[in-house]
Each structure stands twice: as structure tokens, then as C-alpha cells.
Amino acid sequence: MEKFLAAVRNMFNVPDLRKRILFTLGLLAVYRLGAHIGAPGINKERLDAVWRDVAGTLLGVLDLFSGGNFRTISVFALGVTPYITASIILQLMTVVSPQLKKLQEEGEMGRQKINQWTRYLTVGLAMIQTGFVAHWLQINGVGAPTWGFLLTIILTLTTGTIFVMWLGEQITERGVGNGISLLIFSGIVIGLPRGVQQVVERLRGGDTLEAVGVVGLVVALVAVIAFIVFVEAARRKIPVSYAKRHVGRQLVGGQQTTMPLKINMGGVIPVIFASSVLSMPQSLFAAVPPDPSNPNTTWAHVYTFFQTFHASDPYYELIFLTLIVFFTFFYVSIVFNVEEVADNLRKHGGFMPGIRPGRATAEYLNTILTRLTVVGAIYLALVAFVPQFMLSGFKVARLPLIGAGLDAFVSSTPGLSWIPTGMGYQFYFGGTSLLILVGVAMDTVAQIEAQLVMRNYEGFLGSGGRLRGRRAGF
């Protein structure tokens, strides 16, 4: 504890670091202030009634990433969701577009150009999404069915999204940590008091089983957090040797080192990507419902399917976990190019013992990376699924063929009867939230630690420890 307090004091003893931390906290406060500024023309009572009907659907994902702003339709209602979607699209396009691939390989200048395109695409997507949101509000009686309300909501929410994007970029450039990640982090952590209050209310009933359930939930929560920290800090160290070579009149090289590879190189990005992709069709169907007079159309059947599409649904979980695995492999292939790493090693006289430089090194790295990514994808899927399964349950009745029989079995078995409905604790943090919170916290602490060590101050882990941040785009 003394080391932690000393590290906190050191943070504010360094003028530049103190300025960055205060700047970050100030912009996060501005972001939270925006949550209390509502968009014009909103019927609050009707909005609360609508949310009671749709809170369990994927519209809750939008509310999660917006920090509760979507629930109240504040000026920051969409949060960073359009920016995340734009980033997904451009990163996918780098695989099929030679021009984008070339820009990505040009270093800082190429990165700035891609970021500029991301901003433009964010504005376009924000206008489209806010159009759907405005129409959804109109058909649910939350706003007036006029063109004036529609245009006002589009203009207000799009402007708010641009401002949130600017806040995130300013934090990244002039503050501490990654701005977009910290905005998502602040939106989730603001619900901690509400989650604690819910647990305390369950304990006040005096029921012994309730108390045991709460204790079990807290123990499981701590265990999941510890598991996340353990895996996020885990490294696979690959030995690397550098041959001796002459540089001018000096003989350099001949050293032994290691190349540390994270088990989860994608961080929380695959989970954020998967959640964002899943929220898109829900937004579309909510804004464009089918004609109630003709319930037998294809659109009506698809709409009905997605109306029951939520966290405890088997189809949701299957698609969600599949997307996590896909984006894990996709994102790792972008951030770690084995051929480029092998080529750089060869150019600097480096090699891995027993492995020929060049193509053989690239194949060796690809084999290791594939194995690590498999483990990382399974880890992300488990952490995203298990807490949500405990809280919301798993509707086995929706499973094809065996659903009815399996539902009857678990419902009649005392120890398994909680599976379809969950454990009955409406705790705030699910697996996705925990991954984001722990991942962003570790990344931010790692950056502060690096700043302290660089200035010869002792960090949070003391002189013998080191915490590495994750490589992530936001």
C-alpha cells in the first residue's frame, strides 16, 4: 500500500505527467457532463416506458458504450459507437484495398491519413445512425412525428458524436492513456455505485440464501478479475540472438534477448468489435419495424427473431462468441505482421536459435502466434460468456431439436433450475464490461508506470516489477 501511495505522489510530482493526468480527468468530466444535457424535443416519460420494453435487447449495447447516454438520449447519445464502426470498416478494408494497405505500411504519415478517413466516415455513419435513432423515437412516440424533430435530432446527436471523437483524440494526444478506451471506461465505471446499491438492497432482506448468493457472486467477480489480470499480463518469451557485426570500426551485437508475445494480443478490441457489429441490426430493426397488418412477410419473421435476440439467447451467444474469435484472429493479424517482424530481425542481424532467418522465421512466428491467438480467443469468449451466463442465464428452450427436453430437465432439477433465468442478481458488470474495465485500467497504469520509470521515479510495482500495456487501436 505504501508503494502505491508513493507512486500516486510521484505522479503529481512530475509537472508534465501531472498536467497530462489533470487534462485527462478534465476532459472525462466534460464527457460525463454531457450525459446530463438532453436532446431537444424528447418526451422523458415515454422514453422511460420504451426502455422498460427494450432494455434487455441489443440496444443495451449502445447504452453500454455510450455510458448511459443512449438511455436518456443526451447530446452524446451515440458515444463512440460510430467511431468504432468506422474503425472496423477501415481495418477490414485494409485486407482488400491495396491503397489502404500501402498507406498502413507508410508509418506515421499513412496512419494520419487513415485516421483522417476514419473521422470522415465517422461523421457519415453518425448521420445515418442518428437518422435511425430519430425515426425509432418517432414511431415509439418519444418525439414529434415531424421533419423538424428528425433534423434536430440528427444535427444534435451527430454534433455530439463529433465532439466525443474530438475528446478522445485530445486525451490520446495530450493526456494519459487511449482516449476512446477511457471514454468507454468512464461510461461503464460510472455504474459501479448503482451495482453496489443493488447488491446491498438484496442483503438488507436478511435472507440467508440471498447473502450466500451475494457472497458467491462477489467471489466469482474477484476470481474473474484476477483471471483477466493474469492472462493479460502473461507473455510467451521467444529467445532472440544477435550476431556480431562491424559498424565502422566497432564490433557490435552478440547479445541475447527475448521477444515477448502476449497471450491476448488483441486486448479488448475483439469484444468491442463483436458487440458493435451485433448492435447494428438491432438498431435497424428498431427503426424500421414491419407492417403489423401483414405479419407473414420475411421482414416480419426476421424482426420477430431479433426481438428475442438478447444476452441469454443461444443464437445471440453463438454469433457473439463466433465474432469474438473472428475479430481476435483478424485484429492480431493486423497488429503483428510476422513477415515484417522476420524481415526486420534479419536486417538487424537477429535470429532465433535453431531457426533460419527469413521465411523460416516467419513461419515459426506464425505457428506460435496462431497457437497464442487460439488460446486468447478462447479466453475472451469464456470471460465474455461465463459472467453473463451466471447473471442472465441461458435459454436452453431456444436450442433446436433438444431445447424442449433440455429445458424440462433443468427446470425440474433443483440445482440447475437457475440456468434458464440466471441467478437473479441484476449486477451491473457482465463479462464484456469487466474485460473493458480491466484491460483499459491495465493499459493506462502501464503508460503512467512507463512515464514514472522514464523519469527515474519508482512506479506502482516498485523497482522489481513492470506492467506492460496492450497494443490496441483504442
Image (cartoon, grey):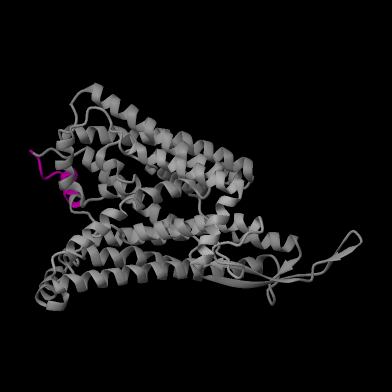
Quick one: 141 or 21, which is closer to the camera?
Answer: 21
Give above or below for 30 relative to 394.
Answer: above
Figure check: 260 above or below 30: below
Q: Position of residue 225 (x, y in %)?
A: 39, 67
Magenta-drawn segment: 293-305
- Residue 474 visible in the picture: yes
Residue 424: in sight, yes or no? no
Identify the residue at image location x=71%, y=69%. Answer: 351
Considering only vertical position in the picture, is 44 above or below 254? above
Our reading of the magenta stretch's main secondary structure is helix
Q: Is residue 430 left or right of residue 186?
A: left
User: Viewed as shown, does residue 48 lie left or right of 104?
Assistant: left
Q: Quadrant of residue 123?
A: top left
Residue placed farthest to the right in the image?
249
**Residue at image location 60% in from the left, 45% down from the top:** 102
Say which residue appears at 37% left-offset and 35% top-offset: 126
Let me know if residue 299 is in the magenta part.
yes
Q: How many marks?
A: 0
Q: Quadrant of residue 404?
A: bottom left
Where does residue 371 sit, x and y in percent of width and height? 50, 71
Q: Work out whether residue 76 or residue 155 is closer to the camera in this orientation and state it.
A: 76
Q: Nearer the viewer, residue 138 or 79?
A: 79
In the picture, measured across the screen, residue 67 lies left or right of residue 233, that is: left
Which residue is the extreme one toward the top? 148
Where residue 213 sits in the image (x, y, percent)? Answer: 21, 71
Q: Is residue 232 magenta?
A: no
User: Residue 240 lies in what quarter of the image?
Assistant: bottom right
Q: Residue at x 16, y 49 (%)?
A: 304
Q: Position of residue 402 (x, y in %)?
A: 16, 71
